[in-house]
Image (cartoon, grey):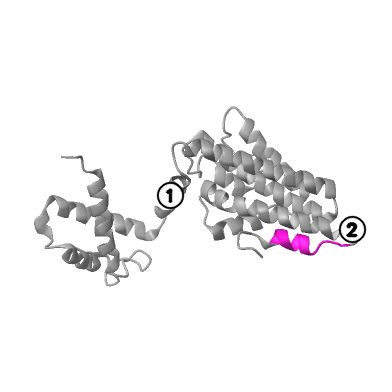
Amino acid sequence: MPETFPDGRILDKIEDHDHQKLDVCIGCLMDDQIELFWHSAAPLAQALLFLEKQDLHALIQTLPLEPDEAEAQIDALQDIEHADEFPDSKPQALGQQLWNLVSNEHSHCYSHSERLGQIEILTAILSMDLAAQYLQSGNVPSCFASCSRAHMHLGMAFIQAGSSYAKDSLRAIAKRGGDAKVKQDPKQRTKDQAKEYWMRWQENPSLYSGPEAYAKDMMNKFGPESDLPPEQAIQNIESPRRWTRQWKAQSNTTEPAG
């Protein structure tokens, strides 16, 4: 199985289809189409939805197993896209996990184009999974229609992403999601506190004789021997050493030219 496939479920449906109902060449053709789709869709989905690879895999496993439910969720996403205002509450037909990705409360999006890109990539993913379901049931016309729809919405997702990337690169957009996720890291608060001490040191150089003295003090204050719970404590002195280099570099890039 190619690494680009986040879900084995789709491939299982192809590999297990009834060869008496379907010509094997159709299955092979769809196999190629799904591989082509995920080769492009997986990295874009990770960037637009701010998901790690394993999180995308987990999302795929929650997709509807019944065609009617999948079609209803696709319709709900398209209703959101074409509405004059973004809904304040979850549409009844839309799954909770999909809603969490695009809702105002949870989304890390900063622009209209990014939000539309999220809706388009989710519609594309749902459509391709639906195509595999139709293939398994022997409904070849619906299978090809859903596959075509998946590629169309994937293209629209790239267009919306491209509109946003005129100002931000893909890497920058993904970084914004990463920054938001870092804020949920238990060690982030510890790092923030360590930075406060670093900033005081910058204002008063007499506080520490150098980076090593600073790093050792941070280990005393926030290390394994401190009162912090293990998930928040600094486990290795290399962390404050690295932070000082990072903050110093950031400080140098933001200083006005003399």
Asked whether the viewer can see residue 73, the reply is: no
Identify the residue at image location x=61%, y=45%: 121
When asked about the image quadrant of residue 155, the answer is: top right
Picture quarter with the C terminus: top left
Picture quarter with the N terminus: bottom right
| Residue 149, horizontal then vertical, whole percent | 72, 42
**In magenta segment, residue 231:** no
**What residue did someone put label 2 on?**
21
Circle number at residue 175: 1
| Residue 214, horizontal then vertical, whole percent | 18, 63
The type of residue carrying mark 2 is Lys
Outermost residue, left side: 206
Identify the residue at image location x=62%, y=46%: 122
The type of residue carrying mark 1 is Lys
Q: Is residue 220 above or below residue 151?
A: below
Identify the residue at image location x=25%, y=58%: 245
**In magenta segment, residue 16:** yes
68, 29: nearer the viewer = 29
